[in-house]
Image (cartoon, rainbow, N blue to C red):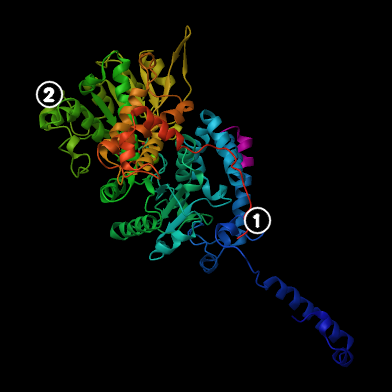
């Protein structure tokens, strides 16, 4: 490389002083420029580059660099300039100052999330030890409600990528891209397309936060090895106009793909991950309802997968509904007599009604009459009011539960009747909200519930995050009184009812089931996740609660017991997989050995296979 000193003596002599000075300056500029552009030879690829602060440039890596360096899929799809990176960082910093001046809000929770996230980046073992030992305090940070705010602010909070991103631009590349992930073994994938994150709507690529949060619980509650989990975002665009206009948004800045094009991308993703990791389990999370049902039907008989919002939520709701029956001092077998009003007919609401009516029907004899009788115990109200068979363009998934014309006259209700009217006329034992509408169980609705035919009406305000809860426990206990059984999707504190009495606030969230469903499927080696396995999980959660607890209105365990309950749920799933002849075994434990295990031995087997956050002995071996 030429430098200033390489000007020959004869040339120096032949030039006028000014010309020589100009030439020297020119040459020195050229030298500096050439030095800056000299390629840096890297001896690492993929994640090792992203974790090296000297070489990492995050989202500013161009697409060709991502391909050259094995980074495709390890970063959100948008390529940004270094100035945009700085703008994003400064915007985030300023927002924090602004919020702090306005008083405490999500900011305080987000600050905790940032500190935990930094620990997660530095030392996974320590991060999970902190999380497991303080799960009650930190589950609301890494999971709902704070994870909702994290997703909303993701582009600002983004520092270091976690997980994989498959975008519409990666069509035809996924089969090779999966090899950019460093781990040869992946047990659990949580995948989202960001189209319905909690009750916050379409957050596009920013929804990756929910997949990360769910996998944190897989590690903390189920003891899945953190080196074998993979959060995934499938970015097919977003219909969130605000994000589309945001220059700092990290996802594809185009509207969502629909129809067959969309399905082809998800198909390609499934083929790619199962081709590299044939034993992986894929949990679908927070897909908008129309795709949630369709993709579940498409894959559930061929792949080890389940949809948490449809199936996990259903199981948790069933366990809680059975708990509410017991809280009335009645046996679980009385469940089919409960009248249940459900607000919300999306993936979660319909998933609950489907599974709960099947549970009732089984208790009634599992025949056609039983199914008809079970169906008639549910009233579903959506954004357009009560769903009846007179509904024009009725959603096919809701159709089986539409109230019949003959029943309507008898009940004095009409198509589209409001929630208040329905509660007044039906006098339900339970109202269950999966509507994503905060405050939907208004004072009037709660007043109407006072006329419930139950001695202990139950309220499930299951929508997330906190601001979307259909009502708060304070509202429920103050309006209905101490008899009410209350649960919510995001955590609330118990309510002091005076005279030493406590109004228990249960957390009715699928986090009590999905970790055990995943772990049980893994340890049984079941090729699919059957209805029976899901039912076994729900029943184990229901029976986990002791009589004296449910009589006090405690229908779900506290988060502090989540590791223990997950172990029990996983063992129930393993046993059901064995009973259904679906289990193919795991590592040394083949199907025959699994079948020989007693109930107690199955629980031990699960416990022994759970990862614990302890530093392993590390030794150096030369290649
Ligand atoms: N606690 C838990 O474990 C879980 C909670 N959820 C929560 O459930 C909520 C809904 O989830 P999806 O079903 O997937 O969403 P979705 O958007 O598909 O469904 C929402 C439903 O609520 C209905 N709705 C809207 N306004 C209403 C109103 N004023 N009255 C009655 N119904 C109304 C809509 O018509 C729709 O049927 C979300 O907030 C989500 O966070 C979801 C899964 C698990
Ligand atoms: C808990 C959960 O899965 C949801 O709110 O979507
Ligand atoms: Mg969800």
Q: Specify which label sits upstream in the sequence, 2 or 1.
A: 1
Residue drawn at (41%, 62%) of the image = 174
Dot 1: within a 10 Å radius of its alpha carbon, few (fewer than 14), some, or many (20 or more) residues?
A: few
Q: Name the residue under label 2.
A: 410
User: Could you tell me how far apart the alpha carbons at marks 2 and 1 are, in whole angstroms?
Assistant: 70 Å
* Whole-percent x, y for residue 401 in the image: 19, 35
- Look at 55% across and 67% down and name the residue there: 65
Q: Do the residues labelled 2 and 1 touch (CB within 8 Å)?
A: no
Q: Residue 241 magenta-drawn? A: no
Locate residue 446, reporting x and y percent.
Answer: 34, 20
The quarter in which the C terminus is drawn is bottom right
- Pick the front one: 186 or 508: 186
Reading the image, the residue beneath label 1 is 53
Left or right of residue 545, residue 424 in this image: left
In magenta, the rendered stretch is 96-105
Q: What element carries label 2?
A: helix
Q: Is residue 463 at least partly visible in the picture?
A: no
In the picture, the quarter occupied by the N terminus is: bottom right
* Disc 1 secondary structure class: loop
Discs 2/1, front: 1
Q: Whole-percent x and y of residue 167? A: 42, 59
Question: Compared to 595, does 233 lie above or below?
Answer: below
Residue 30 visible at all: yes
Q: Main secondary structure of the magenta part?
A: helix
Frontmost residue, 290 versus 312: 312
């Amino acid at each position: 490389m030429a430098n200033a000193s390489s000007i020959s003596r004869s040339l120096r002599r032949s030039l006028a002083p000014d010309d020589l000075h100009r030439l020297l300056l020119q040459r020195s500029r050229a030298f500096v420029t050439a030095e800056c552009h000299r390629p840096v030879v890297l001896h690492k690829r993929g994640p090792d580059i992203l974790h090296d602060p000297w070489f990492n440039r995050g989202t500013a890596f161009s697409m060709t660099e991502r391909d050259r360096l094995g980074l495709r899929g390890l970063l959100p799809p948008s390529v940004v300039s270094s100035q945009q990176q700085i703008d994003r960082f400064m915007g985030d910093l300023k927002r924090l100052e602004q919020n702090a001046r306005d008083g405490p809000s999500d900011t305080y929770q987000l600050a905790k999330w940032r500190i935990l996230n930094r620990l997660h980046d530095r030392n996974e073992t320590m991060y999970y030890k902190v999380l497991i030992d303080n799960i009650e305090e930190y589950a609301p940070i890494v999971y709902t409600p704070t994870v909702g705010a994290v997703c909303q602010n993701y582009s600002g909070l983004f520092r270091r990528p976690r997980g994989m991103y498959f975008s519409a631009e990666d069509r035809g590349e996924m089969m090779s891209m999966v090899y950019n992930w460093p781990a040869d073994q992946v047990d659990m994938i949580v995948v989202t397309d960001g189209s319905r994150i909690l009750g916050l709507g379409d957050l596009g690529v920013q929804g990756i936060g929910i997949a990360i949060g769910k996998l944190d619980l897989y590690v903390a509650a189920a003891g899945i090895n953190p080196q074998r989990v993979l959060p995934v975002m499938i970015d097919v665009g977003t219909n969130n106009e605000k994000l589309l206009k945001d220059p700092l948004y990290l996802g594809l800045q185009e509207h969502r793909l629909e129809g067959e094009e969309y399905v082809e991308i998800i198909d390609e993703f499934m083929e790619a991950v199962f081709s590299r990791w044939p034993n992986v389990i894929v949990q679908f999370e927070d897909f908008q309802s129309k795709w949630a049902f369709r993709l579940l039907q498409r894959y559930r008989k061929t792949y080890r997968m389940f949809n948490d919002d449809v199936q996990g939520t259903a199981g948790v709701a069933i366990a809680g509904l059975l708990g509410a029956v017991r809280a009335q001092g009645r046996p679980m077998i009385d469940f089919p007599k409960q009248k249940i009003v459900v607000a919300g007919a999306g993936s979660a609401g319909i998933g609950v009604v489907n599974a709960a009516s099947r549970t009732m029907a089984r208790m009634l004899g599992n025949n056609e009459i039983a199914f008809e009788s079970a169906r008639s115990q549910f009233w579903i109200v959506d954004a357009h009011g009560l769903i009846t068979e007179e509904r024009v363009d009725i959603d096919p998934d809701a159709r089986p539960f539409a109230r019949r014309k003959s029943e309507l006259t008898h009940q004095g209700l009409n198509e589209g009747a409001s929630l208040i009217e329905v509660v007044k006329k039906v006098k339900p034992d339970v109202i269950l909200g999966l509507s994503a509408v905060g405050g939907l169980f208004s004072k009037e609705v709660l007043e109407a519930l006072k006329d419930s035919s139950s001695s202990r009406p139950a309220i499930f305000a299951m929508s997330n995050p906190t601001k979307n809860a259909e009502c708060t426990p304070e509202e429920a206990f103050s309006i209905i009184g101490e008899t009410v059984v209350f649960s919510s999707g995001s955590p609330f504190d118990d309510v002091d009812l005076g005279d030493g009495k406590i109004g228990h606030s249960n957390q009715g969230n699928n986090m009590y089931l999905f970790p055990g469903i995943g772990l049980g499927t893994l340890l049984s080696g079941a090729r699919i996740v059957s209805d029976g396995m899901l039912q076994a999980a729900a029943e184990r959660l229901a029976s986990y609660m002791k009589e004296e607890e449910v009589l006090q209105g405690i229908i779900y365990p506290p988060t502090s017991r989540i590791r223990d309950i997950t172990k029990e749920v996983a063992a129930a799933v393993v046993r059901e997989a064995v009973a259904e002849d679906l289990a193919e075994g795991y590592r040394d434990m083949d199907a025959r050995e699994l079948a020989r295990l007693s109930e107690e031995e199955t629980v031990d087997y699960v416990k022994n296979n759970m990862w614990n956050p302890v530093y392993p002995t590390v030794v150096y071996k030369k290649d």
